[in-house]
Amino acid sequence: MTSAKRIRQIVSQNAIYFILLALIIVIAFISPDFLSWRCFRDILLQSSTRAIIALGMSLVLITGGVDLSAGRAVGLAAVVSASMLQTADYARRFFPDLPQLPLIVPILIAIVITLLFGLLNGIVISRLSLPPFIATLGSMVIIYGANSLYFNLPPNNSQPIGGLRSDFTNLGTGYIGISGEYSIPYILIIALVVAIVVWVILNKTSIGKSIYAVGGNVNAARVSGINVAKVLIFVYAFAGLLYGLAGVLEAARTGGATNNYGNMYELDAIAACVVGGVSTTGGIGTVPGVLAGVLIFGVINYGLTFIGVDPYWQLIIKGLIIVVAVALDIRKYLAKR
């Protein structure tokens, strides 16, 4: 392989990182304050829940599927957890007579609910052979309808849920370590733990190998003795669990919730996965790549806002990056064929 061809290959395989580097350089040139720990920490803070959602989505994409219900599951978990974790003296409590529950109870309830919806997705896709796009599109609508009905219960009547307990909001806004500028957010630590768990599942367990096998060639996986239905049910259920965790943390981070929380988050997660190297054809993807994809969009969102770029231009830039990433992914797939 000639040096020129090798350089083209390196650029082709890592083009998105060169784009990220160029963005950082341009933003830092316009505003040198961007290259500070405070800005970097804020980007990580805002990206933490998105990373958890993207990690769940990556498992689904690696199997060759897609999950359009992710965003609405996030919103459901946010509303359910927030509705049961308001302070006792808040004027508009969702459940006026509900005693102060231990913090873990509403969190587990919210996560279990989204896990069950994910489990239902996996069963419908694996047992009824529905395309993932159709199955999760249906569950997306169902989850949003159920969440809206719950959110509209009296005496709340579709009012934004606020007045959350400090022990709950501390999960999303609290810090550990050195006080002040160099402290580390709790929510970032939780996201890193989730990333480690997903990495272990994909790289150190038999179910992880099966996930890649199903995404690479489902027929070959079935012939080799892999229980494809079991793999799909696990993937969608575990993804649902992660969406629920992200929804809980999003409510804690923002200090409230409405039934519109999580809207379009699934598209951001898919975009981050694709940009991070998860193949749209299945069978390929890594945890570091997914985290890099989330970080890229975090830099775009925060950095362009930092220098005052119009939000509509931000959407155009994000869209162009997604198109470039998918185009490169398809080119690599065709080259392998």
Image (cartoon, helix red, strand yellow):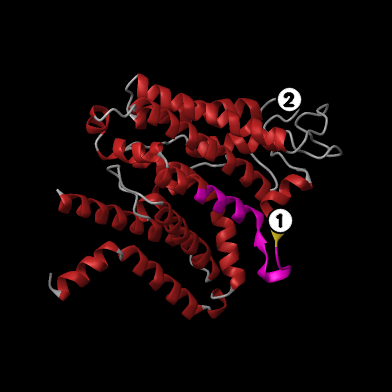
Image point (42%, 45%), residue name: 204
Could you tell me residue 27's position as x and y percent? Answer: 47, 74
Asked if one can make out residue 259 in the rendered structure from this viewpoint, the answer is no
Q: Is residue 48 visible?
A: yes
Residue 179 counted in the magenta span: yes
Query: Residue 154: which disc?
Result: 2
Which residue lies under the disc numbered 1? Answer: 174
Q: Position of residue 234 (x, y in %)?
A: 44, 31
Give the image quarter of residue 43: bottom right
Task: Tell me the crowding category of disc 1: few under 14, some 14 to 19, or many 20 or more residues within 10 angstroms, Cα based.
Answer: some
Does 302 lie within the magenta span? no
31 over 166 or under it: above or below: below
Considering depth in this image, is 201 or 300 the residue closer to the camera? 201
| Residue at 58% across, 28% down | 113
Magenta range is 177-196
**Side of 167 where 190 appears, left or right:** left
The answer for how far apart the CA atoms under marks 2 and 1 are is: 32 Å
Q: Position of residue 127 (x, y in %)?
A: 36, 20
